[in-house]
Amino acid sequence: MGRIVIASDHTGVELKEDIKAFLNEKGYKVVDMGSNGNESVDYPDYGIPAAQMVSSGKIEKGILICGTGIGMSIVANKFPNIRAALVNDVYSARMAKEHNDANILVIGGRVAGKGLAREMVRVWLEANFEGGRHQRRLDKIREIEKKWGKPT
Ligand code: RB5
């Protein structure tokens, strides 16, 4: 089992803890980048360091949580090599891997309950990227990074 980095803002702390427990049960080593507690924080302060770990290849996969998941997905997708997928249903979670090879799963902590969140994480981790025409599409996205650059 590999390592997974996880981070949330204050709206996702409870869900983060539950997903951590779920991943630990499954044998993953979870690197928790915060936040912790109820104090209001800014999601980029937690999403950026987590996304950097995946972007640099230090850790293969990440899970980010904010209220809707929107802010965290905007942050993560600024980084090279990141394909962050905001999902709030199980079908999209599976497709995020099979078609998009998403290396970061983003969940809305105020949108998805714990049961749904665990199921989305499970199917994303168990799915396999299908390659083929989907790889061609990802290559076209990679071209954007090459042309315009992204922050590191
Ligand atoms: C915090 O209130 C909220 O804006 C944040 O968690 C997230 O949903 C932003 O996209």
Image (cartoon, rainbow, N blue to C red):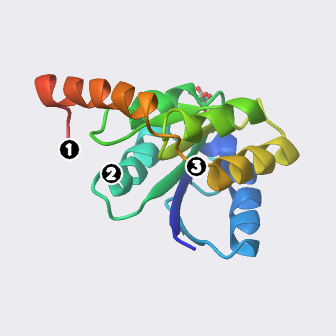
Which residue is located at x 65 percent, y 47 percent? 124
| N-terminal-most mark, 3 or 1 | 3
Q: Which residue is denoted by mark 1 in the rendering?
A: 152
Query: Is disc 2 placed on a helix, strand or loop?
Result: helix
Query: Which marked residue is nearer to the observer: mark 3 or mark 2?
Result: 3
Q: Is residue 108 left or right of residue 112?
A: left
The residue type indicated by label 3 comes to Asn
Find residue 52 and name its label: 2
| Gap in angstroms between the C-alphas marked 3 and 2 | 23 Å
Rendering coords of residue 51 (x, y %): 39, 48
Q: Nearer the viewer, residue 81 or 48?
A: 81
Q: Is residue 58 above or below residue 148?
A: below
The answer to whether 148 appears left or right of 10 in the picture is left
User: At x 49% / y 38%, what residue is drawn?
Assistant: 43
Drawn side of residue 58 relative to residue 131, left or right: left
Few, some or many residues within 10 Å of mark 2 (<14, 14–19, 20+): many
Q: Quadrant of residue 134?
A: top left
x and y percentages locating residue 45 in the rendered image? 41, 44
Residue position marked by numbered label 3 in the rendering: 128
Q: Are marks 3 and 1 in contact (CB under 8 Å)?
A: no
Percent x, y for residue 82?
A: 37, 41
Q: Amino acid at mark 2?
A: Gln
**What's the distance in space between the residues labelled 3 and 1, CA to CA?**
27 Å
Question: How busy is the neighbourhood of tag 3: few (under 14 within 10 Å), some, or many (20 plus)?
Answer: some
Q: Residue at x 61, y 57 (%)?
A: 36
- The location of residue 145, given as percent across then percent down, is 21, 29
Q: Nearer the viewer, residue 35 or 129?
A: 129
Q: Is residue 96 above or below residue 55?
A: above
